[in-house]
Image (cartoon, rainbow, N blue to C red):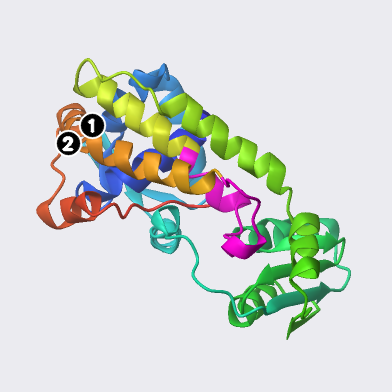
Amino acid sequence: MRPRSLVFTLFGDYFRYCGDGEVPLRGIGEVLQLFDIEPGSARVVMSRLRAEGWFETRRDGRLTTYVLSAKAWELLDEGRERIFRHVPGDWSGDWTLIATRAGDRSTRDEVRRRLTWLGFGQLQPALWVAPGDRIAAARELLDADGVSSDVFLSRSGDIDRDRSIASRGWDLAALDDLYGAFVERHGDAADPVDDEDALVQRVRLTDEYRRFPFVDPDLPAVLLPAEWNAPRAHELFVRRHDELRERATAAIERLTGMTVTGAHRAFLDGGAVGFTQE
């Protein structure tokens, strides 16, 4: 796991629930050492994330505390439900189509990243598609980025054509293989030997699974291949995440010297964690 990704996983699943998103750098460093990240490296990573606007800091004597910024809270809240979302329901047959007009390369790259996060696939360099009515979210994103585009609903009227659209917009075979590999890696995991091992296992599980919302558009079942592995992976993740919760949380509290508050603990018990696009 990259240190940067690890920090966001820890804040999404634990640190945001300790002291309203305020965690001493010393406590962050203690946890990161479980993943072979030394205190000096932890300071560098946190300093860079602060410079990018994800955190603010507070000094109390020699103690530095990192505080989630408004920008970070917004993204954590935005992503909270996505990792535990249910399989989509019935599909109307509508597609949201976006035809973008040329911008500079950096803008196109940013639009590609954010449209993928919204569940859009790319049929052609300037043509994006997603199942269902996602017009409002797409227009909000494109207007915020100042991208010239046309957004509209359409339908093919033919399920075979719809399946062809899905196969061209997303590499479903590769995605299915990723889900299958996740099940193989985590399906027979050994029981943790102590609380710290439970924390390491849970963080690794979460850090890997939280990447699926970036690549899985949540297509309707009628468009997916037979024996789709995503439901098996989702069930495994939710089950293991819950099984490891109590011991992993105990390790966080011991290492940081902080308490996961009752109200925030309810989020953890209910399987609602926050994740960003990092």
Tell me the number on the disc at residue 246: 2
What amino acid is at disc 2? Glu
Q: Is residue 218 in the magenta section?
A: yes
Tell me: 138 left or right of 171: left
Q: Residue at x 81, y 78 (%)?
A: 148
- Magenta residues, start to end: 209-228
Among the 4 quarters of the image, the one containing residue 122: bottom right
Q: Nearer the viewer, residue 196 or 22?
A: 196
| CB-based contact (under 8 Å), mark 1 and mark 2 | yes
Tell me: 266 left or right of 72: left
Q: Nearer the viewer, residue 27 or 132?
A: 132
The spot of residue 248 in percent (x, y) is: 23, 32
Residue 140 vertical placement versus 238 (above, below): below
The spot of residue 108 in percent (x, y) is: 79, 60
Q: Nearer the viewer, residue 35 or 204?
A: 204
Tell me: 265 left or right of 212: left
Q: Is residue 93 in the magenta section?
A: no
Tell me the number on the disc at residue 248: 1
The spot of residue 206 in percent (x, y) is: 41, 38
Q: Residue at x 46, y 51 (%)?
A: 54
What amino acid is at disc 1? Ala
